[in-house]
Image (tube, rainbow, N blue to C red):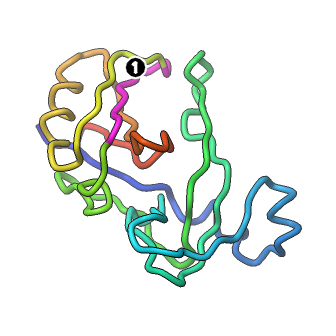
Amino acid sequence: MSFRITGLPAEPFDALFSLSDDALAARRAMRVVAEEGHGYPCRISLTDAEPGQTLILLNYEHQPADSPFRSNYAIYIREGEQQFDRIDEVPDQLRRRLLSVRGFDKHGMLCDADVAQGTALEPLIERLFADDRVACLHIHFARPGCYAARVDQA
């Protein structure tokens, strides 16, 4: 089964990078500098920031469905990034982490979920999409719980 993993589109976030720290704070966001590698995952490019790179940490509604599973959480974004959008390709950022994968139906209701190492993501994607009710998958970083990426059938 073919799948498509996508990061977030960059355009909705473009204006944030020119805001002052006070203006960011008014939006529940803040500018941060990556202190170490593999600790600051950009949700646009699905790559990790290198130490010294600047990112914006903000609250993002990743599950906007009008259901009990509506959800938002903190994410990092990096300026100048392009949206990850590939078929049958898992980015290295996901491969290196323990992931929680949640399958939602077309109404935003949770159908199934499981946890897997990123190195074992494809079999889990296939298993969850085998359920005809599942319309899309949301990948989260299992330990901090934050949203990472979306998966659709290709």
Residue visible at 54% across and 74% down in the picture: 34
Res 150 quadrant in image: top left
Mark 1 closeness class: few <14, some 14–19, many ≥20 residues within 10 Å? some
> As displayed, is residue 102 above or below residue 14?
above
Look at the image and say whether residue 105 sits in the magenta stretch: yes
Residue 77 lies left or right of residue 31; in this view the side is left
**Residue 76, how many percent across, how many down?**
56, 61
> As displayed, is residue 94 above or below residue 113?
below
Residue 58 lies left or right of residue 147; in this view the side is right
Q: Secondary structure at mark 1?
A: loop
How many marks the image carries: the answer is 1
Residue visible at 83% across and 75% down in the picture: 20
Res 58 quadrant in image: bottom right
Please tell me whether the stretch drawn in magenta is mainly helix, strand or loop.
strand
Q: Residue furthest bottom?
A: 52
**Residue 14, how many percent across, how many down?**
65, 70
Q: Nearer the viewer, residue 26 or 12?
A: 26
Please name the amino acid that badge 1 sits on: Asp
Residue visible at 73% across and 64% down in the picture: 30
Residue visible at 40% across and 20% down in the picture: 105
The boundaries of the magenta stretch are 99-108
**Residue 15, how many percent across, how many down?**
72, 70
> As displayed, is residue 6 above or below residue 120?
below
| Quadrant of image for the N terminus | top left
Residue receiving disc 1: 105
Q: Nearer the viewer, residue 135 or 31?
A: 31
Look at the image and say whether residue 60 sits in the magenta stretch: no
Residue 59 lies left or right of residue 48; in this view the side is right
| Quadrant of image for the C terminus | top left
**Residue 114, how many percent across, how many down?**
29, 26
